[in-house]
Image (tube, rainbow, N blue to C red):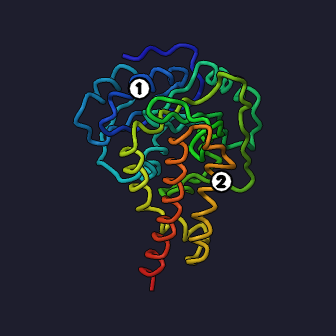
């Protein structure tokens, strides 16, 4: 049974499918939240047993291709206006929890999205560069009364008109530790899942297919990842990750082309 102590009025929504080997450390890092709501996506492992020790609510739901599909279903069920979306492979450091506490004590009423410092880890090692590595600021904390929630890739949570967003300043140890990928096959599998939703998502963002744009953006993505985002600092790993980033860019445009064709 979870014991609450000095918590913040935040609901954390965590969903997992056979990620028990990652889940416990994630849930431990969320104990500063008033509510931890766990959605098990029909796991075959020990995820539910772990969740029962560290969360307030445990529900079972069908497996989905993209995690965004569950957000419109379960965000309305959360008890607090402020909610945090986090995956089992993420850990909120104590210092970041303290930064969130300080931020919420002074935040303006017109703020509905808070971005937090984040570092991605590949095979257990922090990435220094590429589009996947280095210091980034990830959308993490939302005010339900100030956002619209849907199931689309990239745009599933949007600020309502009249609301704004802020980011928490990085101060060395206050970050979201994201154990992003355990290996190459994991990364390719993750990309392939997200590509299934890219056609519609890109179309809704206003993009339309162009072969020349596809070629240009693919090359630009590799250059941006390896050179601009300093992927070379990660050696051959950075080179390979930059190629995979370019691959995703190329295939994303293919998905847009197929989606446009399906509308005819």
Q: Nearer the viewer, residue 152 or 149?
A: 152
Residue on which disc 2 sits: 224
Q: Secondary structure beneath disc 1?
A: loop
State which quadrant residue 234 falls in.
top right
Q: Nearer the viewer, residue 196 or 217?
A: 217
Looking at the image, residue 204 lies above or below residue 227: below
Q: Nearer the viewer, residue 248 or 178?
A: 248
Question: Residue at left 46%, top 20%?
Answer: 28
Asked whether residue 90 is in view, the answer is yes
Q: How many marks?
A: 2
Q: Secondary structure beneath disc 2?
A: helix
Q: Position of residue 184 (x, y in %)?
A: 40, 44
Image quadrant where one finds the N terminus:
top left
Q: Position of residue 112 (x, y in %)?
A: 67, 43
State which quadrant residue 134 falls in.
top right
**Residue 223 left/right relative to 261:** right
Q: Position of residue 259 (x, y in %)?
A: 45, 74
Question: Residue at left 56%, top 44%?
Answer: 132
Residue on which disc 1 sits: 56
**Residue 63 left/right relative to 255:** left
């Amino acid at each position: 049974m979870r014991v609450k102590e000095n918590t913040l009025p935040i609901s954390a929504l965590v969903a997992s499918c056979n990620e028990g080997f990652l889940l416990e450390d994630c849930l431990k890092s969320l104990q500063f939240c008033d509510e931890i709501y766990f959605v098990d996506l029909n796991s075959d492992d020990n995820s539910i047993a772990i969740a029962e020790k560290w969360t307030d609510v445990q529900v079972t739901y069908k497996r989905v291709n993209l995690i965004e599909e569950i957000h419109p279903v379960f965000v309305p069920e959360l008890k607090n206006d402020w909610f945090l979306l986090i995956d089992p492979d993420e850990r909120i450091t104590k210092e970041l929890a303290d930064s969130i506490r300080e931020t919420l004590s002074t935040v303006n009423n017109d703020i509905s999205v808070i971005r937090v410092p984040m570092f991605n880890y590949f095979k257990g090692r922090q990435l220094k560069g590429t589009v996947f590595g280095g210091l980034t600021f990830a959308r993490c904390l939302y005010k339900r009364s100030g956002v619209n929630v849907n199931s689309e890739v990239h745009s599933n949570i949007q600020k309502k008109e009249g609301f704004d967003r802020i980011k928490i300043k990085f101060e060395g140890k206050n970050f979201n530790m994201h154990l992003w990928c355990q290996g190459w096959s994991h990364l390719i599998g993750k990309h392939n899942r997200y590509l299934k939703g890219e056609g519609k998502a890109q179309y809704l963002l206003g993009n339309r297919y162009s072969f020349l744009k596809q070629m240009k953006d693919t090359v630009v993505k590799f250059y941006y990842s390896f050179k601009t985002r300093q992927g070379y600092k990660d050696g051959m790993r950075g080179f390979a990750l930059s190629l995979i980033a370019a691959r995703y860019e190329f295939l994303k445009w293919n998905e847009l082309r197929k989606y446009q064709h399906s509308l005819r």
